[in-house]
Image (cartoon, rainbow, N blue to C red):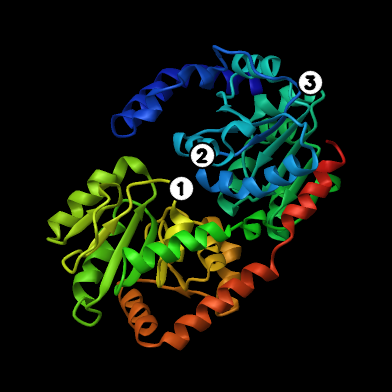
Amino acid sequence: MRFFYSCLFYLLIPFILLRLLWRGIKAPAYRCRWGERFALYNKKFPQGVIWFHAVSVGESEALFPLVRQIQKQHPAAKLLITTTTPTGSARVKAVLQETVEHVYLPYDLPGAINRFMRCFKPKLAVIMETEIWPNLFVCCGKNGIPLYIINARLSEKSARGYQKIPSLVHPALAQVSCIATQTQDDANRFLAIGADSAKVLTLGNIKFDVEIPQSTFAQGFQIKADLFRGRFVWLIASTHKDEEEIFLEIYKEIKQKIPELLLVIVPRHPERFSDVKKLCEQFQLGVTMRTADARIHTLTDVYLVDTMGELKMLYAASDVAFVGGSMVPSGGHNILECSAVGVPVMFGPHMANFKEIACGVLSHNAAIQCQNKGDIIHAILALYEQPAYREGLAEKGKSFVLQNQGAVARIFAMLDQVI
């Protein structure tokens, strides 16, 4: 089965490259570093690395505390982090800089995977969340590389898909030393697709171990005092296409009730910055871009964040936040960073990728889930008019995050036995 999978993958390469070109129209980074995607390198890298793979920004952010713990306990260790997306790549470089090696993960083609392994000779492979690549996993097994899946999660939909191709999935999972899942439900789904019960542990979600440096709070408070002074700041984080329009409509509807309201919009993907700006102008709203370095004035309706990596700081500069990717069926985004900063958090109905977190935070009355535009309007007005309610929601959110921390320590203890 893996032979036919590889043949199909090779046949799809022209279409994959065309997709990279298409995405590169708005995000030029997708047109760069194609050689890395085929494990073709123009420099020599260290060998014997501890290798981590994190698909994009969210997985990278979650991984950083664990990486720092390993760097602290094993300062001589050589670390490699691979990502799939340019935004994930940029985040790794910005946060960890020269302390780790970084390349894109090559496509799951036998030739590319073998070149990757010969180049880096990993002594340990650690995959974040749900990435199951048959050729990659089998290559780890053949080379005697311990392979761990950490912070592992598996949706019901993905599990059903994997169950349809057991002859491809079972040999891949057989190479895994341990699967450390976020929840018992995730563990059960991994068992259902063929994982060995002796290799599946539930160690919690490392996204609860979010790190917020004091400097981030200080910078956020400074922005609130200097740039957003006198405004009630409602931050809309990680928005996707068709979401911004919802919040711009709400802004125009409630502006008279909250005259000092300022909408701060942080699009999820940088290639959409200019589109969101045009949308704000179509709504005849005053928009200021973060990179314009301009002051906010009374006619500013929207502060559009056209930068990456500043979300935690901007949470600290906000009064209330709504986490996007949840008003459209995109699966939602991580709400824990917002709660950890101490800002009341709202989100929409589509939270499939964060189902357990959403259920947990709602059961603790530590966030507000909105099903539609009417719910959002009701919630934002209540939060604006009742400061005590706002503060209580924020405190419950922080408490919820603190109560569920510890996964990084547990996963580090597991990996430390092999390191």
Taking the spot 64% from the left edge, 32% from the top edge, the residue there is 100
SS assignment at label 1: loop
Circle nearer the N terminus (3, 1) = 3
Report which residue position mark 3 lands on.
142
Q: Give the camera-side residue of 79 and 22.
A: 79
SS assignment at label 2: helix
SS assignment at label 3: helix
Left or right: where does residue 107 sit relative to residue 204?
Answer: left
**What separation in Å lies between label 1 and label 2 (alpha carbons)?**
8 Å
* The C terminus - image quarter: top right
Above or below, 95 against 364 in this view is: above
Is residue 193 in sight in this rendering? no
Residue 309, disc: 1
**What separation in Å lies between label 3 and label 2 (alpha carbons)?**
34 Å
Circle nearer the N terminus (3, 2) = 2
Decide: marks 1, 2 in contact (CB < 8 A)? Answer: yes
